[in-house]
Image (cartoon, grey):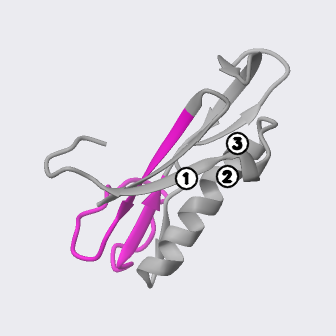
Amino acid sequence: MLLVQGSAGGTTLTGTLYERGERAPTFRGAPDEDAPYVWVCDEFYEVESGGSEMEIDGRSVNVAFDSPMPRGFDTREQAITAAEEHVRTQFARIGVAPAGVEVEVEKAEPGAEV
């Protein structure tokens, strides 16, 4: 299991990439269980009012969250590329330039809860 983490503007978003042979969570909308790589991460976007308040680059932003959108991939490279793009896109949706998002990919510690 890999954690793909994007950081920008004083906040962080982390998603989970389940690798071949690992058991990805099963829930409505999850990709076919036969997908060798499964990416799961929240989606969020800026709203005028309501949502959760976040501090981004010194400004207050109201953010609403969507349910995680799991996606299946055939190769590790495809999955990591899509995960990195996903994280950058979420920050762009709240006004952070994709180039300003620092993305890290790291192996999750055994037994880590995600």
Circle 2 sits on which residue? 88
Residue under numbered circle 3: 91
Could you say where residue 77 lies in the image, as x and y percent from the top left? 48, 79
Residue 103 got which mark? 1
Q: Nearer the viewer, residue 29 or 47?
A: 47
Count numbered badges in the picture: 3
**First reached walking from the N terminus: tag 3 or tag 1:** 3
Q: Which mark is residue 114?
A: none
Instruction: Name the residue: 78% across, 31% down.
Output: 46
Q: Amino acid at mark 1?
A: Val
Mark 3 vs mark 1, CA separation in Å: 11 Å
52, above or below 42, in the image: above
Marks 3/1 in contact by CB < 8 Å: the verdict is no
Mark nearer the N terminus (1 vs 2): 2
Task: Kindly identify the residue that appears in the image at 41 percent across and 67 percent down.
Answer: 38
Quarter of the image with the N terminus in it? bottom left
